[in-house]
Amino acid sequence: MHPGRLPLKPYAGKEIPISVLEMMSREEMLWISRVALQIEFFPPCIRNIIQKTKGEKGSHRTAAILAAFLGQAGWGETEAKEMWSKVASVEERIFTEWFGKMHCPKCVTLNRESEGYPDLGIADLGCCQPDEKCPGFGGPVEYAALLKVEEDKSRGTLKHVKTLHLSRIFDLGSGKEGEIELSGAEKDQLESLLKEQTENETLVYTCIKVRGRLRPKFSLRVSEGPKRRFLSELM
């Protein structure tokens, strides 16, 4: 992501009038350790998640974090699922969606307040109890695999997990730029709307919950006035 842009995600149901500046794609790669990292090398947060009692608060968040971590820690799927099943008290789809497919969150995300899954902030769960090594690493995978500099990543492999589709947009209400991550279907829908859009219509962006995740949704609305009205109000 360009350093001058921020991800744009409105609260569910809130509508934002936007214009699309650019459509982009990039490949997302997942770093995976070549050898299975043993439990004694796990960071305190992951060890605390493993020791949590089943059914405690935040079980979906911790289950997703553990699955993602084990995937990057080089564990085989069978061994990882056996470990995960002893700890997690949630539906198996969480393991399937996160193991070997998603990045384990960095410390900055884990230390964030969260209203619940799929936001993986766990500041409210007390799992983060840093030891003397923690300040030297950016996240659980980096801690366990001792990834301090770029050259250290040679101890693992890169797995292609998906093609990311991004839309760089301009928020007509706030005057700010942002980026929206899209699935292939969402990208196709947005491109179709852009072709249909007339001069007196404004593209509107909102978020809806799909299988527990906030996903972008776009629609066209008849403008109350010329689109330049949005821009003139910002000047």
Image (cartoon, grey):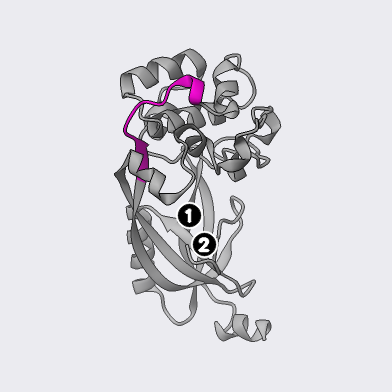
Q: Quadrant of residue 57?
A: top right
Q: Which residues are magenta?
A: 30-41
Tell me: 171 left or right of 69.
Answer: right
| Label 2: how many Cα within 10 Å (few below 14, some 14–19, many 20+) | many
Where is mark 1, residue-wise?
A: 216
Q: Residue at x 52, y 62 (%)?
A: 205
Tell me: 38 left or right of 10.
Answer: left
Callout 2 amino acid: Tyr
Callout 1 amino acid: Pro
| Label 1: how many Cα within 10 Å (few below 14, some 14–19, many 20+) | many
Assess whether mark 2 and mark 1 are in contact (beta carbons under 8 angstroms). yes
Would you place residue 177 above or below residue 14 in this image?
Answer: below
Where is mark 2, residue-wise?
A: 205
Give the image location of residue 52, x and y in percent.
Answer: 60, 17
Nearer to me, 156 or 162: 156
Tell me: 145 left or right of 173.
Answer: left
Q: Residue at x 63, y 34 (%)?
A: 122
Give the image location of residue 179, x and y in percent.
Answer: 49, 63
Would you place residue 57 above or below residue 27 in this image?
Answer: above
Which numbered tag is attached to residue 109? Answer: none
Reply yes or no: does residue 34 show up in magenta: yes
Q: Residue at x 54, y 19 (%)?
A: 50
Q: Secondary structure at mark 2?
A: strand
Q: Secondary structure at mark 1?
A: strand
Q: Residue at x 35, y 37 (%)?
A: 32
Disc 1/disc 2 C-alpha distance (Å): 7 Å
Nearer to me, 33 or 155: 155
Give the image location of residue 112, x and y in percent.
Answer: 66, 42
Give the image location of residue 82, x and y in percent.
Answer: 39, 15
